[in-house]
Amino acid sequence: MTADAEERAQALWAAATAGDESAATGVAMDALDAGMPMETLLLDVVAAVQARVGHEWAANRISVAQEHTATAVNERVLATLAHRSSRPADQALGRIMVACIDGEWHAFPARLLAEVLKARGWQVDYLGAQVPTPHLVAHLHLTNPDAVALSSSLAIRLPAAHAAISACQAAGTPVVAGGAAFGPDGRYARLLGADAWAPDARTAADLLAAGLPRRITSREERPPLADREYTELTRSAGDLVRDIVADLTRRMPQLAGYSEQQLGRTAEDVAYLVDFLRAALYVDDPELFSSFVGWMTGVLSARDIPEAAVPAALDALADRLDGYPRALHALARARAEHGADPGQRT
Amino acid sequence: MVEMVWEDAPYPMLAISTTGVVEQANQAARLLFAEPLVGARLEHSAPGWLSRAHFGCGGSERHGEIGDRVYQAHAVHATADRTVWWLIDVTGRRHEADSLREWAAFLADASSELLPSLNLDRCLEVTACLAARRLAGAALVVLPRPGRRYAIARCARGGQAVREDAVIDPGTLPGLTEALQGFPPVPARWSAPEDVPGWALCDGSGEVGSVAVIALPGHGLPAGALVLLRGSRDGFSDDERMFARLFALWAGSAIAVARLYVEQAVITETLMSELLPPPTPILDGVELAARYRPAGPSERVGGDFYDVYPVSGSGRESLVVLGDVAGKGLEAAVLTGRIRNTLRALLPLADDHHRVLELLNGVLLNDSATTRYVTLVLASFQPRGRRVEMRLTSAGHPAPLIMRTDGRVEAVPAVGTLIGVLDEITSVTDTVVLEPGETCLLYSDGIIEARGGPLGDEFFGEERLSEQLGQCAGMPPEALAERVQMLASQWVGAGEHDDMAVVAISAPRAPRGGHL
């Protein structure tokens, strides 16, 4: 990143977190007027600021309200830039559909890719956040794009991502997957059968420029799940979360004084753990769960939640998942890597 | 005597001694093998596959080529431990089997390439390419479009498909008019190249020796025609005629379904555009954002609705209406359409919310087509300096929430009866002032009645909504509407939910800057 881009990113960050939309669009417009290429502005300024929003929120240096405000301002900047760069689509390049997986709310990365592709001359159909797979397929039949770019940030959407990828391919359209959900090296994108994976918008645009071949998938059979652990855990997730919260209030005396609101938050955190455990079982990778537990431990300790809470929840989960060998293995690994002994550190 | 029979037998015969030397060969065998045979060792005079079969190292493979023919070998054990090989010419059968296998592979390709897509252009292109791969050197698919135009996809063997829309005269290619009408039936036959008009020629198709026109039948209606161009003057073989007809049936079905799909989609789009939530306009001195999510995953409209009218009543105020018709899905959406039209007509009376609701109530009660009711909230507003003055009236709808800059969240009672049930309705209009950075949130009950959460069976509820909003003080309306929609959707998870609508109206924190 150049010093110029860094300086403008700093100015945009200040405007976005202050919720000052006009100052933020001003920063972007000034950059364009000063001759900064659209792609550089999008990726090295706007995207860089958005990434920082995520980091700062995880470290509890900005509030949820500030996070959403900054994101909304950044979205408006993107919208303004989109309006400004009305480059006509280059017929020879083709047409790309960009969408978020069903349940995925983080539309920013997808929107960014859509703008980068438009700036490069593609005809782009941007379908936005949480696109139900039936919508995706219906749209695909109508527009016949050369490829679909699917974005997902959270690994708990991987089962939904699998359904969406398979559906697009069954309709004869290749899929490039992107976003943090697919793992730092894109391993889950490959596992779920995506035709390509891109770590960022620039790579995705390059991949699409090189062209993805259309494949014929109607004769391929989908491999079944390894066992019923994912299915069973999905079915009983609600009951499991209720039981774990009850266990936690017994195991951790601090929780006895929690208000109903705080207990509600605890239940949400436990539900999150169960969701990630399910995703890890789906892709059969204990690493997925362990790295989430590491991230969650960091987020909670930044918010003064007792450090013992995560290991205690892992233990409570392990107690109730007798007969789920893969789940137990994932729990044991996460416990070994991230869980200090709750007995010693309270 | 026996030797006589062998000598004249119509099948080549070789008698091999225990040491592997050819002892006898009949006339057919001597003609088949060019070299002198009798007295030579088998492996020196016969092809490898036959000697391997003889010496027992050929596995079960007892057939192979001799010259340009294919033979099946049968061994008979004769006296003095000799082995007699009879060779049967199976060239014809082999060709037949190969040809059937190729056709089967072609039809399998055709189905797996035609089946996945419901896109009309794609189906036309795939059909042309498939035909050029097996049936002709080049192929065209012609499909009538409205207004004397024709969609044409063409492809030469080994090339890429090209799609264009053109004005052509189908009468210039004999048989095409009939094939496009599907009647009278035309036999699939090849004709002389003098008949091929210029528009039907493909790049790379080379000299045209013959041309054939085949109708594509599509579920009872004609689905275009396939035009095949060949360099040679050979006609169809029997196999080709049969498989070309099969292919035409499959391609025709695929094209017909894709055409139906696109027609339905256009109709739906046209009718739906009236029912879709409107874009939010940019207003002076007020910021506004809205979100809508219908109940079904494959639906785009439902029983919730909102509208924003920049000018209403005597012209000073703008009006936002957010409502919820009983039921969901298309049927409810159609009723929202009628209610929205009625409200638009009542716009000049918007200075008096009660009057508007009364008139709407009367219209719904007299509407014999529906027994449904609606709840709604009317929000009239106008900027006063940096503040926004609002009048709010709720007709059986969840109370609007006011988010103050200090994090307080106030519900505006503004209670009234729902619309379309009782002859007489009651309503109360409340007045609210938004300071800069404060927001009024209108929402439908799909938000608070979202069922799910970490335990899977709790309502999201007004309390949780208010608590969450308390942390959102000062957020711009766009971020806020998004946040509310997201919280409720995440609460529901993969479960079922009702339609969800949110409108956020804010007094801007800072006056709009001049950067644009």
Image (cartoon, coloured by chain):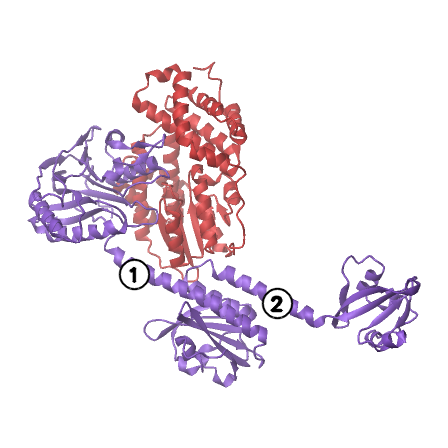
Q: Position of residue A17 (x, y in %)?
A: 30, 35
Q: Are marks 1 and 2 on the same chain?
A: yes
Q: Identify residue for label 2.
A: B100
Q: Is residue A290 left or right of residue A132?
A: right
Front residue (pair A24, B485)? B485
The residue drawn where x is 19% and y is 48% is B307
Q: For the residue labelled by badge 1, is the local secondary structure a helix, a strand or a loop?
A: helix
Mark 1 or mark 2, earlier in chain: 2
Query: Outermost residue, front direction?
Result: B1
Q: Residue at label 1?
A: B267
Q: Quadrant of the N terminus of chain A?
A: top left
Q: Is residue A294 above or below residue A282?
A: above
Residue type at numbered disc 1: Ile
Q: Classify residue A254 as left or right of residue B464.
A: right
Q: Which chain is purple?
A: B
- The chain coloured red is A
Q: Is residue A34 visible?
A: no
